[in-house]
Image (cartoon, coloured by chain):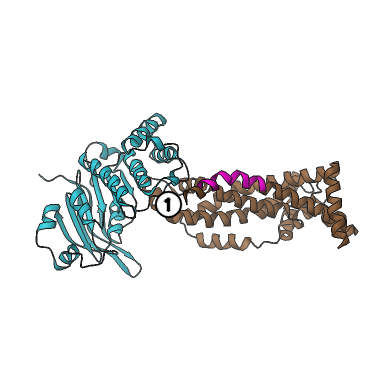
């Protein structure tokens, strides 16, 4: 039996003034999935991520978080997001982690433990006292991942997490994401890198002009016959 | 031209001699303006950051009012505080008129809009980048505002310094509510105004030079405080 959705969008639309950013989206995010959102620039990937997360409200339709047993019934759905350009406070690596955990209301001892674990996991222990903004791009993105992971999210959203990184940093960040995915953390990631989608995702959503054109398991997406525009996108004939 | 040279000489002599009356005036000027800046910073930083981050009805009107208050003439502030603190005024019973406290209040009213408006602009720029990440972590508007104040603390130091510059150089309001009483409410600017009216231009200019030197020293101290951060940034480029 298919797992119930953690988040479900029903005929969800988002409009910014005259621009219809998303239109009639029906999609669910199930526990343990790694979903890749692909599509050209301006297709609505980031808006869909923000909508699923709850940072953006629907103009039409609805975002539903069904009631579940266990933690979700009492604490609500916990979402975290890693952005294309991570925002880090002008403080040390450790302080950034501690503030994120403080915002999530973890007690002091728990904060210290989680921060230590997250730093170790992302290979940042040696940089704990460094000002976060002096880290390299790849290190900053790993710190953003560490912050998001440390808050123990039910769903982790990643908005083009390896864009603007050099190939080495890309590999580091992708390896960290792959590790999280292999542990069963639910991930929803937008990417322009189809290779990355193929390597990491279990399911691919293809967006065009704010509409969800394809929602398919990863193998099917790369092998089956797709709508003409998606085929063109895959062949690299459309703009990224 | 001779007056200018005389003034330099006199300023140096006054400083070198450590004239107790001059020292008392300098110390009172610093105390009044620093207290006003402290109060202004407490109110203005929070108000500015909150206006940058929060969204509520009437916000644009409040921002417009704040920006308009940037042009508030100090004599108008002096007049308002005078009316507030005079015997017939609502706070007349506090007996603050012609005391340093009244001068602190007047200067605070002057610097709060300046600190709040400049803070709002700084925090608004950071907020454009930080809004989603901070909201994603669960930060409400007030928490986000405070975090962004911490984030922008070095730039905000310059804002407070600018406010201090405005406060210590101000003459109209402190003259009206302080009264320029020797040994009680006489500060650098009111002393300069008095000496000018008496025709002792050299002494007035010398006091002006001392005022500039004091502000220059505070500026230099703050620059030194920010120096390690600048070096760190330069090393990264």
Task: Identify residue for label 1.
Answer: B130
Task: Report if residue B95 is visible in the image.
Answer: no
Q: Which residues are magenta?
A: B220-232
Q: Is residue B224 magenta?
A: yes
Tell me where residue A124 appears, x and y as whole percent.
36, 38
Shown in brown, the chain is B
B177 or A99, which is in the foreground? A99
Residue at image position (90%, 58%) is B198
Residue B12 shown in magenta: no
The answer to whether residue A226 is above or below residue A74 is: below
Question: Callout 1: 10 Å neighbours few (<14), some, many (20+)?
Answer: some
Residue A209 is drawn in which quadrant?
Answer: bottom left
Left or right? Give the position of A215 relative to A176. Answer: left
Quadrant for the N terminus of chain B in the image = bottom right
Say which residue appears at 31% left-offset and 40% top-offset: A149
Please state the chain letter of the residue tagged with numbered disc 1 in the rendered image.
B
């Amino acid at each position: 039996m298919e797992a119930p959705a953690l988040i479900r969008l029903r005929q969800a639309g988002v409009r910014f003034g005259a621009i219809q950013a998303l239109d009639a989206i029906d999609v669910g995010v199930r526990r343990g999935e790694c979903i890749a959102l692909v599509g050209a620039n301006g297709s609505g990937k980031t808006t869909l991520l923000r909508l699923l997360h709850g940072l953006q409200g629907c103009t039409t339709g609805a975002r539903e978080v069904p009631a579940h047993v266990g933690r979700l019934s009492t604490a609500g759905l916990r979402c975290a997001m890693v952005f294309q350009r991570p925002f880090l406070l002008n403080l040390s690596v450790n302080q950034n982690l501690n503030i994120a955990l403080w915002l999530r209301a973890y007690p002091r001892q728990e904060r210290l433990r989680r921060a230590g674990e997250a730093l170790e996991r992302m290979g940042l222990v040696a940089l704990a006292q460094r000002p976060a903004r002096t880290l390299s791009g790849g290190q900053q993105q790993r710190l953003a991942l560490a912050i998001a992971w440390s808050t123990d999210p039910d769903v982790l959203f990643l908005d083009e997490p390896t864009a603007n990184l050099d190939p080495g940093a890309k590999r580091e960040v992708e390896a960290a994401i792959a590790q999280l995915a292999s542990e069963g953390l639910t991930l929803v990631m937008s990417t322009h890198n189809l290779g990355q989608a193929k390597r990491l995702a279990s399911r691919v959503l293809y967006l065009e002009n704010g509409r969800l054109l394809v929602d398919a398991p990863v193998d099917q997406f790369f092998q089956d016959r797709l709508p003409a525009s998606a085929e063109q996108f895959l062949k690299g004939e459309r703009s990224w | 031209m001779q007056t200018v040279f005389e003034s330099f000489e006199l300023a140096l002599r006054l400083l070198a001699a450590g004239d107790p009356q001059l020292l008392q005036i300098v110390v009172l000027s610093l105390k009044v303006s620093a207290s006003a800046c402290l109060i202004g910073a407490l109110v203005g930083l929070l108000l500015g950051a909150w206006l940058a981050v929060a969204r509520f009805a009437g916000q644009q009107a409040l921002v417009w009012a704040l920006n308009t208050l940037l042009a508030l003439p100090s004599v108008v502030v002096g007049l308002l505080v005078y009316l507030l603190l005079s015997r017939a005024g609502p706070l007349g019973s506090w007996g603050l008129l012609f005391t340093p406290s009244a001068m602190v209040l007047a200067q605070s009213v002057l610097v709060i809009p300046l600190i709040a408006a400049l803070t709002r602009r700084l925090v608004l720029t950071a907020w454009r980048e930080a809004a989603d990440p901070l909201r994603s972590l669960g930060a409400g508007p007030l928490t986000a505002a405070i975090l962004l104040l911490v984030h922008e603390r070095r730039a905000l130091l310059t804002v407070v310094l600018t406010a201090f510059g405005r406060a210590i150089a101000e003459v109209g309001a402190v003259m009206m509510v302080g009264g320029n009483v020797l040994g009680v409410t006489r500060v650098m600017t009111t002393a300069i105004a008095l000496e000018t009216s008496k025709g002792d231009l050299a002494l007035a200019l010398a006091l002006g030079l001392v005022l500039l030197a004091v502000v220059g020293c505070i500026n230099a101290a703050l620059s030194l405080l920010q120096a390690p951060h600048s070096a760190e940034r330069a090393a990264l480029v």
